[in-house]
Image (spheres, grey):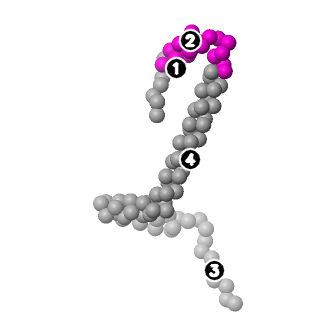
Amino acid sequence: MFDLGWSELMVIGIVALIVVGPKDLPVLFRNVGRFMGKARGMAREFSRAMNDAADEAGVRDVAKTLKTATNPVSSAMDGVRDAAKSMTDPTPPQKKRRG
């Protein structure tokens, strides 16, 4: 999101030290940390809600269909990959019991 390097963080820290003062600086950083935690939680919740809404609307199925239609070679390779995976599956098939 924000691309901050160490030099930018150092400048922000020095300016905060000068403006806020050394006594109140830990309180400021604690409050900023709480705010960032709340903001990340809200963003995570929003993203999860949007993914759930997309799942309910069937967007992923449409996207998969479009991918298959636009790139049939890739979808064929997915089928080959799935077949190879099922052939190398270490679990043996279950035998049917006669009852």
Is 47 above or below relative to 93? Answer: above
**Distance between the alpha carbons at the discs numbered 2 and 1:** 15 Å
Q: Dot 4 lies on which element?
A: helix
Q: Earlier in the sequence, mark 3 or mark 4?
A: 4
Is 56 above or below relative to 8? Answer: below
**Distance between the alpha carbons at the discs numbered 2 and 3:** 75 Å
Question: Which residue corresponds to mark 4?
Answer: 45
Region in magenta = 8-27
Question: Which residue corresponds to mark 2?
Answer: 19
Q: Earlier in the sequence, mark 4 or mark 1?
A: 1
**Distance between the alpha carbons at the discs numbered 3 and 1:** 63 Å
**At label 3, which amino acid type do we have?**
Lys
Viewer-nearest of discs 3 and 1: 1
State yes or no: residue 55 in magenta: no
**Distance between the alpha carbons at the discs numbered 2 and 4:** 34 Å
Q: Looking at the image, which residue sits at the far left?
A: 70
State yes or no: residue 12 in magenta: yes
Question: Which residue corresponds to mark 1?
Answer: 9
Does the residue at mark 4 contact the one at mark 1 (Cβ under 8 Å)? no
Q: Earlier in the sequence, mark 2 or mark 1?
A: 1
**At label 1, which amino acid type do we have?**
Leu
**At label 2, which amino acid type do we have?**
Val
Question: Which residue corresponds to mark 3?
Answer: 95
Viewer-nearest of discs 2 and 1: 2
Main SS category, magenta section: helix
> How crowded is the residue under tag 2: few (<14 C-alpha within 10 Å), some, or many (20+)?
few
> How crowded is the residue under tag 4: few (<14 C-alpha within 10 Å), some, or many (20+)?
few
